[in-house]
DNA sequence: GAGAATCCTTGATCTGGATCAGTATCGGCT
DNA sequence: AGCCGATACTGATCCAGATCAAGGATTCTC
């Protein structure tokens, strides 16, 4: 793995709290595997003997319905992990996974992890901390889903696509707009309209290229909506339903 | 702790996968503490040196705003745990917690857990599995929040309040309707109306007493809506946004 | 027991986003 | 070229739930 790959793994929910040294020793001699667009990672029903870290590209999790339709359950980007639950539970994958773009995945083997934990308990403790953090982030993300309007969520997404924070920039949308809409919790139609409404903030769309006149302005828009949700009880964060933590 | 208390702890996200024997040895000589209605459990900003299991009653997590308003973040019922993330992360509580009704809480001390894990690594592994499951449940719960209509969520809530599955039953609402509405992700007004709309299914409301003519009918209503969300891609489960797992 | 404060309900209106339907644009293909 | 299927945009309509506003009802307080 390249140095960049290590930093990705190091920011991952289950390894973030672990420290690079420990992570390295755990994942020594593991190497990522490449997947083509459309290639299958695992299929619904297979024994869940591993979970995965996305190093590059995009992975789609979907459930196959009796009708043959695919229902997209989630989409994962670089730096995210998936299928941990199924692996820890030791059951079978309840969904199928497939690469939406060319992708590189790191496979974390369940058996291996098991023995490593028995050998070095500290790993488990750190992973537990990381898992709690992950949960917390999940809850926050969902709060925002509930609280933010469609244009706000799109702005949020755009800001997340680049490290540029001021001045003009052109962003290439990473995959089909329908899929992005899906990920942001809206229909393709709503996505199209909401994106159009961002024109007022200096956002121009030309096919898959989105040109932002001034990132600072867009970032401010995102921040402002975040503040509202923080202050305004009407739009509050309640309702995350009895689970969770913080 | 009473035998019932043990079964509650045993069903808890972090202990469910652990088995009763291990849980007992871990929590030996711990005893629950009682809280009055309105009593504070911990306050925003205090060092997070423990997490809690709700054995009885209801606990509200809230954030205090500069304006002095309380924003309810979550409500926990018997059998749920809270503040794990803050504890594992070893920081401070980012929210305050207070009993909404008389309550009994089991306090799980961070230091103690730490040393127990170092002594018996298996505990950590089981907790990790349990945490993954918890995450999965959280995601499912949120999917349903997005997918179910207001009356469906209320029916779901009512079904969860009793073990009766057929015939007539009267359920006492566990706390203020506004708080329940909150928990179910809607305004008090919507709650009131949605509850009224359940009259067609033989649900009568008399103050805090909800009388269901036939639980089987209500349960069927909940199940049916679940099926629709399973089959109908239009109402699908997408959009849980890049985190999560399954 | 009068008055006040809470809590709950009900009605009227508004609105964001979904749905449905029609059209445009693009890339691949023979 | 010209056809075709996939992808994207746009307009029209609809609806669940939020918001605003105004009453009841119950409990608390003095």
Image (cartoon, coloured by chain):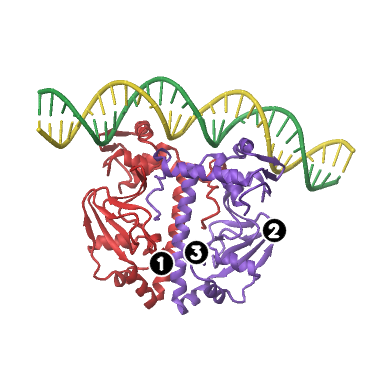
Chain colours: A red, B purple, C yellow, D green
Q: Do residues under tags 2 and 1 come within 8 Å of each other at their CB atoms?
A: no
- Can the viewer see residue B82 in this picture? yes
**Chain of the residue that carries numbered disc 3 in the rendered image:** B
Taking depth in this image into account, of B24 and B225 the one nearest to the observer is: B225
Quadrant of the rendering where the N terminus of chain B is positioned: bottom right
Looking at the picture, how far across and down is residue A27, in whole percent?
Answer: 29, 69
Nearer-the-camera pick, A107 or C30: C30
Residue B29 location, quadrant = bottom right
- Could you tell me which chain the residue with mark 1 belongs to? A
Query: Which chain letter matches label 2?
Result: B
The label number, if any, that marks residue A151 in the structure image: none
Which disc number belongs to residue A127?
Answer: 1
Measure the alpha-carbon separation of dots 2 and 1: 35 Å
Q: Is B29 placed above or below B104 here?
A: below
- The residue identified by callout 3 is B91
The quadrant the C terminus of chain B occupies is bottom left
Q: Name the residue under label 2.
A: B102
Look at 22% across and 50% down and name the residue there. A102
Q: Where is residue A227 in the image (x, y as percent from the top left)?
A: 48, 44
């Amino acid at each position: 793995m390249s140095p960049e790959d290590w930093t990705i793994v190091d920011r991952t929910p289950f390894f973030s709290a672990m420290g690079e040294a420990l992570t390295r020793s755990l994942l020594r001699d593991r190497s990522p595997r490449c997947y083509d667009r459309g290639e299958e990672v695992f299929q619904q029903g297979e024994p869940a003997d591993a979970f995965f870290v996305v190093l590059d590209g995009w992975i789609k999790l979907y459930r196959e319905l009796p009708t043959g339709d695919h229902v997209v359950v989630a989409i994962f980007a670089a730096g995210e992990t998936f299928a941990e639950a199924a692996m820890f539970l030791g059951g079978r994958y309840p969904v199928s996974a497939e690469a939406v773009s060319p992708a590189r995945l790191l496979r974390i083997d369940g058996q291996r992890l098991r023995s490593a934990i028995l050998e070095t308990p500290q790993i488990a403790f750190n992973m537990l901390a990381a898992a709690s953090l992950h949960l917390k982030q999940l809850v926050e993300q969902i709060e925002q889903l509930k609280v933010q309007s469609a244009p706000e969520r799109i702005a949020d997404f755009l800001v997340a696509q680049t490290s540029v924070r001021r001045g003009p920039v052109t962003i290439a949308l990473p995959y089909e707009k329908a899929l992005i809409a899906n990920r942001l919790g809206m229909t393709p139609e709503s996505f199209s309209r909401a994106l159009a409404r961002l024109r007022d903030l200096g956002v121009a769309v030309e096919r898959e290229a989105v040109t932002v006149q001034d990132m600072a302005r867009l970032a401010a828009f995102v921040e402002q909506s975040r503040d509202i949700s923080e202050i305004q009880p009407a739009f509050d964060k309640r309702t995350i339903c009895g689970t969770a933590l913080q």
